[in-house]
Image (cartoon, helix red, strand yellow):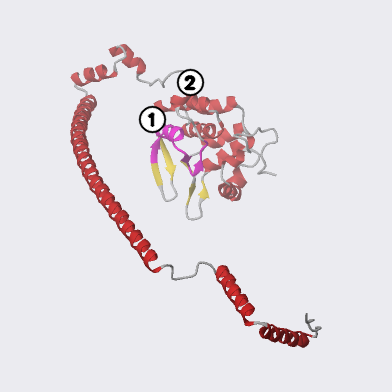
Amino acid sequence: MANVTDPLARTVHGKDPQNLIEYITRQKIYDSIYWKEECFGLSASDVATKAVELKALGGSYGANNKPTRFLCLTLKLLQIQPEEGIVEEFLMNEDFKYVRALGAFYLRLTGRPAEIYEQIEPMYNDFRKLRFRTPTGWTITHVDEFADELLNSDRYCGIALPHLPKRDVLVSAGYLDGPRRSALTPLIEEESGGDAERLLEKLAENGNAAAVVAMNERKKRKREAEEKERSFRQQVIGGRESSTDGRRQVYEHDRSSRSDDRDRSSQDGDERFHGRDERYQSSNTDRKKKEKKDKKYGSLFKKSSSKSDKEEFKTKSSKSDEGGDGDVAESIDYWNAERAKLGLKPLKED
């Protein structure tokens, strides 16, 4: 039951607050000795007391990916879900930097975009050092760098951060009032009427080494930008000239190719016309020769078999008429024999 979220806690981004930390990392935190011995039954004030004792930030470290104390206290805050006023007190605490960092990390996980920008951006003016424990060792960071990572990164301490819209989007939508005010804004308005470059020039004239270096870098970047713009313009002009020459060459080539195609098509048309005339003349001559042959020799084949059969029948009938009664008698005897084979009665003689 020690790992269950507070029943009165509300969902964050549509899910259980503890689920903002990945399952495997959560299980490693639950199995860690610090969680079992030091984080059992803590309230918000107890978490603040434990945060005062923190010595470093970080996610997991070592070969077994052990969770840091900072990550364990973050999960504890997600489990008990303290009130917004308590989280604001964490962020406003300038005496203990790790307490402030813990509150900022918790707010980045659970807060609304406008609140995140309004409450974490003041940390840009805090330049104190922070120890950060990596999986393989230690590094040094600063509070302002930590705040910038929270506002611009998608992951921190090995934890996936919820999506945060850009500041310009929130300003255009009316959730934030204008751009972020820097800590140098009052000084710039007082010394140079709001012009930061004029203030930088004044500092450089007074012998400020950092201002001199910054002015030289600005001049260098300005020269490089001008050279890039000049080279870009030359490329654009040269590209236009080459493109016009190329278009002119393409146009002339198209004209010449069209004229060649026209001449070729006219020649092909003449050849086709002459070929048609020759074929027509040859077909006429063949037709005339065939007609002459038909007139001279007549048809070599019978036109229809039915007419030939009729003519043969007529000739046979005429021959039979000329042959007399002998032939008739022979024919009667023949047919009677045939009918007898079939079992029919013989024909009657007239």
Query: Taking 256 as reference, is 181 left or right?
Result: right
Q: Provide the secondary structure element on which disc 1 rests.
A: loop
In front: 205, or 302? 302
Callout 2: 10 Å neighbours few (<14), some, many (20+)?
some
Residue type pointed to by label 2: Leu
In front: 155, or 7? 155
Query: Taking 237 as reference, is 158 left or right?
Result: right
Q: Residue at x 55, y 38 (%)?
A: 74
In front: 325, or 127? 325
Q: Residue at x 38, y 30 (%)?
A: 127
Residue type pointed to by label 1: Phe
| Residue 13, x across and y down, in percent | 59, 34
Does residue 3 lie above or below 118 as drawn?
Answer: below
Q: Which residue is mark 2?
A: 176
Which circle marks residue 177 in the picture?
A: none
Label 1 – label 2 distance at C-alpha: 25 Å
Q: Which residue is mark 1?
A: 127
Foreground label between 1 and 2: 2
| Residue 45, x across and y down, in percent | 60, 31
Q: Provide the secondary structure element on which disc 2 rests.
A: loop
Looking at the image, is mark 1 or mark 2 earlier in the sequence?
A: 1
Does residue 310 lie above or below 222 as drawn?
Answer: below
Is 267 magenta? The answer is no
Q: Residue at x 55, y 37 (%)?
A: 50
Query: Taking 328 as reference, is 192 left or right?
Result: left
Highlighted range, magenta: 140-162
